[in-house]
Amino acid sequence: MSNSKAQQLVRIALLAAAFAAAAGCSSGKLETKPAAEPLFFPPPPAPPRLQYLTRLSSQLDLGGQDSAFRSLVFGQETEESHLVLKPYGLSVHAGAVYVVDTRGGGYGVFDLAAGRTRFVRPAGPGRLRKPINISIDADGTRYLTDTERNQVLVFGSDDRFLRAFGQDDDYRPVDVLILGERLYVTDIAHHRIVVLDKASGEIVDTFGSVGSDPGELFQPTNLALGPEGQIYVTDTGNFRISVFTPEGEFVREIGQIGTVVGQFARPKGVAVDRERRVYVVDAAFENVQILAADGTPLLFFGGAGNGPGGLNLPTVVKIDYDNVDYFRQYADPSFEIEYLVLVASQFGANKVAVFGFGRQRDDARPRRRPERTGGGG
């Protein structure tokens, strides 16, 4: 490693601490009191664009039939009561949030409509060894990547195993994106995107090759589809987001390694909203950055900690326009939610942190800054 790059990494470590302090208190922890004022980003006096709403970690977070009884028994959520122990990927489909558990060998389902949870742990030929990400088709078919099996596993809408794609170390899949009759898979071992026929699993195309030049990839991890039909690839080893057409033509790149907002240290999940705002998870900074389509930084949120809005080794971010009504009860009356932003964390209390993106109502009264404990603000 060159001296200049080593110096960059040291500066990134320092910036990670600064990000955490900016998002929380001086100790780098978000310790907002549960009954305090709502937590907005950016903080006052700037107009709010994002509010932390709640978290999804266990049955208690859904307020199901047994939530009152379990609250009486447990007093509060514990690690043992969490549905998913070590989340990575997540997907939203038909009023439910699906969260992959890399430690538990399956995926948890938070059914928002029914207010219930369940955990799916396949056995036999569909047994998961190290599941990472999940994508769900319109008909409910689930596609999961497994980096120990080196396969994409397919399950029906009833959670039954159907088939597995990949053999003889064809690829080491981290994420899978569904687009029409094709599956786009990040192959972290060969630094490329593999395109599969959705029905047969046959490789029909590949694009990207190892390197750092525009259009080249190094350890690609996560994928997102933009509103214009372009594919956003988290090029983790190159500290950037690379954008391609579905045919594999390079379009542009966003970000680079660095120590200022708009640059990345350990980029993971990526998502794009309908206005082409790009959300990028950074596991080193333990936050999510929002960028304009051209890479201009707009906002960052999150920060290390177990308090409201806290993230601990975050992995994936998803945008959801369809289930706002289930979470509107958590929004401040002054704040109008446009869509949800869900962020998974591998550790800590907030397995899936739920935020609402929107704006303050025109007739809203001025906000006060949330109370914080544990140090200076």
Image: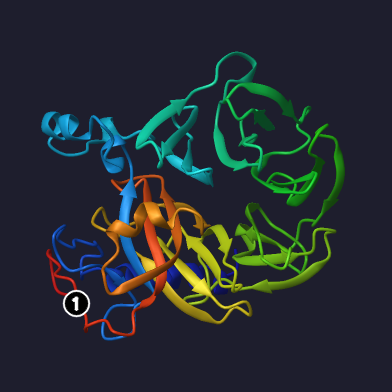
> Which sits in the foreground, 31 or 69?
69
Asked whether the viewer can see residue 260, the reply is no
Color encoding of the figure:
rainbow
Asked whether the viewer can see residue 270, the reply is yes
Neighbour class for label 1 at 10 Å: few (<14), some, many (≥20)?
few
Circle 1: element type: loop
Q: State the image coordinates of residue 84 (x, y, percent, origin top left).
A: 39, 35
In the rendered image, which quarter contains the N terminus?
Answer: bottom right
Task: Residue at 87% x, 48% y: name it.
Answer: 205
> Which sits in the foreground, 216 or 361?
361
The image shows a total of numbered marks equal to 1
The residue most toward the top is 124
In the rendered image, the vertical position of residue 233 relative to residue 165, given as above or below: below
Q: State the image coordinates of residue 113 (x, y, percent, origin top left).
A: 41, 41
Image check: 181 left or right of 353? right
Three-letter code for the amino acid on which mark 1 is drawn: Arg
Q: What residue does disc 1 label?
A: 369
Q: State the image coordinates of residue 366 (x, y, percent, origin top left).
A: 21, 84
Q: State the image coordinates of residue 148 (x, y, percent, origin top left).
A: 61, 30
The quarter holding residue 24 reads bottom left
In the rendered image, the vertical position of residue 117 relative to residue 359, given as above or below: above
In the rendered image, which quarter contains the C terminus?
Answer: bottom left
Task: Residue at 31% x, 37% y: name it.
Answer: 58
The quarter holding residue 42 reads bottom left
Task: Residue at 40% x, 42% y: name it.
Answer: 112
